[in-house]
Image (cartoon, rainbow, N blue to C red):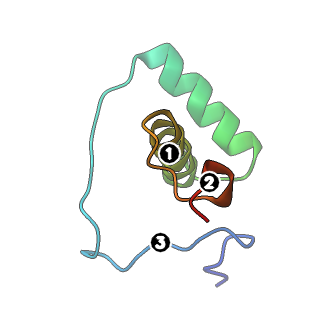
Amino acid sequence: MNRNRGGLMGRPATGQTRIMGFRPPKPLRDEFEALAKAEGRTPSDALIEAMHCWVDKKRRQHGTDSTPEAGTG
């Protein structure tokens, strides 16, 4: 069994990360799940990517980005 899922980041071992739960509106959830499936991804993988993007955006907005483009590298 290939646990790498096509080169995507693997899941941490059970119990290693805290579970988050929320209830998105049904139309948003339906579209999100369809898009993830179309890309051959799990909803968890897509949500993790979205969270990284949001955090990176907020870091840039607040001037806490540590990338060379922010002038701290």
Question: In the displayed structure, does residue 49 sit left or right of residue 22?
Answer: right
Helix, strand or loop at mark 2: loop
User: Crowding at label 2, few (<14), some or many (≥20) Cα neighbours within 10 Å?
Assistant: few
Circle on res. 71: 2
Type of amino acid under label 3: Arg
Where residue 5 sits, quadrant-wise, is bottom right
The mark nearer the N terminus, 1 or 3, is: 3
Tell me how far mark 2 sits from mark 3, CA to CA: 33 Å
Where residue 32 sits, quadrant-wise, is top right
Circle on res. 11: 3
Q: Position of residue 25 (x, y in %)?
A: 40, 16
Residue to which mark 1 is pinned? 47
Q: Which of the image's four quarters has the N terminus?
A: bottom right
The mark nearer the N terminus, 2 or 1, is: 1
Tell me how far mark 1 sits from mark 3, CA to CA: 13 Å
Type of amino acid under label 2: Gly
Q: Position of residue 12 (x, y in %)?
A: 41, 76
Q: Position of residue 40 (x, y in %)?
A: 72, 52
Q: Is residue 61 above or below residue 70?
A: above
Question: In the displayed structure, does residue 72 sit left or right of residue 51?
Answer: right
Instruction: Find out whether the residues at labels 2 and 3 contact each other: C-beta distance under 8 Å.
Output: no
